[in-house]
Amino acid sequence: MISKKTFLNKKIIITGHTGFKGSWLTLWLHKLGARVIGISKDIPTKPSHFTSLGISKYIKSYKMDINNTSKLIKIFKKHKPDFVFHLAAQSIVSKSYINPLETWRTNLMGTLNILESLRSIKNNCAAVIITSDKAYKNLEISRGYKENDLLGGIDPYGASKSAAEIVIQSHIKSFFLKNKNNVKISVARAGNVIGGGDWSKNRLVPDCMRSCLQSKKVLIRNPNSTRPWQHVLEVINGYLILALNLKRKQKFHGEAFNFGPNLRTNKKVKDVVNKMKKNWDRLIWKKIKTKNFFENKLLQLDSSKSKEKLQWKSVLTFDETIELTVDWYKNFFEKKDSTMRKSLIQIKQYENKIRSLK
């Protein structure tokens, strides 16, 4: 359980703070009393969770590309962050086929620029760099991938994340030697994250929720694909716990950690859609036959290392994950609670669930 005093008044840089996961992380850290400094080149979607939260007035934001190396280094030197969470990425697989150059530039070179910025500061700092489950060389095996399994994403997105991990390890071994540096770095790998506030195109949940609003059928490419469906708050809780442990313990420097759901929550796409339909009967879907790019049919994580070393675990059931997600979107469309209030309520619900299991 994350206590408020842990991040109180801590200076925290979040890249990609206007995105889906970034906006939830920004909100949670603001709730915990942190001094958040956000870096994003734009607001990636419309609508936007970040915009509808109205949280920009409570934090410091820089609108810039993380590939602007000199400006990025100046920001790091100016703010001297206690923690860094690097989430900025081109994270849509289908978009990586349309614009692979942008994907590689953002995911690989952007990460290198973060590492160089960390190298420029003299204060103590714990940095969590987020990559992806798609960084693994996926053989579509029945067991979950462990942190020491081979990397090697197939699509441009997955490959760019694999390459970023090579750069991360190279920099750690070259410039952030254990026991001799002020900066400690860990890698976090998560899977298929869902939840309220995701408005990305070509992603299952927001596509379904938009279709509900527009009373249209949602088109499903591969209903039999199996994914690890996990609520965004589960993953962000993992990032926060990892950052705290990294700050306190040298042994986590250079380590990677998986944050995936229980394997029993791995479900086919069609199971997720049908469960959402039970929570919101306006949802109608149909399968389409055409598919223009490769998609993994089976990909799952083994998070036993995070459970053992960080005492982190996924606490939400599959049903609870879907219920929280659909409830957020229904509230948004029906304009009941404000986005800020509803999102804070869901963070509180999640915190209460953690307490109930202790």
Image (cartoon, rainbow, N blue to C red):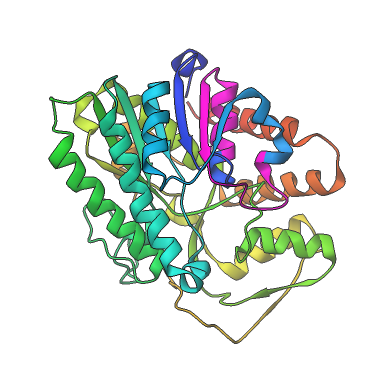
Q: Residue furthest bottom?
A: 289
Q: Which of 134 and 144 is in front in this view?
A: 134
Q: How far across and how far down the image is residue 12, in percent?
A: 45, 26
Q: In this view, does 145 lie above or below 110?
A: below
Q: In which quarter of the image is residue 114?
A: top left
Q: Quadrant of residue 201?
A: bottom right
Q: How far across and how far down the image is residue 100, in percent?
A: 43, 69
Position of 348 with respect to 38 (left or right) is right
Position of 251 with respect to 131 (left or right) is left
Q: Which residue appears at 62% of the width and 31% of the height?
A: 347
Q: How many marks are shown on the rendered structure?
A: 0
Let me know if residue 159 appears in the view: yes
Q: In this view, does 73 lie above or below 331?
A: above
Q: How far across and how far down the image is residue 92, in percent?
A: 51, 62
Q: Which of 129 and 324 is in front in this view?
A: 129
Q: Is residue 278 above or below residue 236?
A: below
- Is residue 26 magenta-colored? yes
Position of 281 with respect to 95 (left or right) is right
Let me know if residue 301 appears in the view: no
Q: Nearer the viewer, residue 182 or 219?
A: 182
Q: In which quarter of the image is residue 287?
A: bottom right
Q: How far across and how far down the image is residue 188, in percent?
A: 36, 44
Q: Is residue 331 above or below residue 237?
A: below
Span highlighted in magenta in the image: 23-50
Q: Which residue appears at 48% of the width and 79% of the height?
A: 293
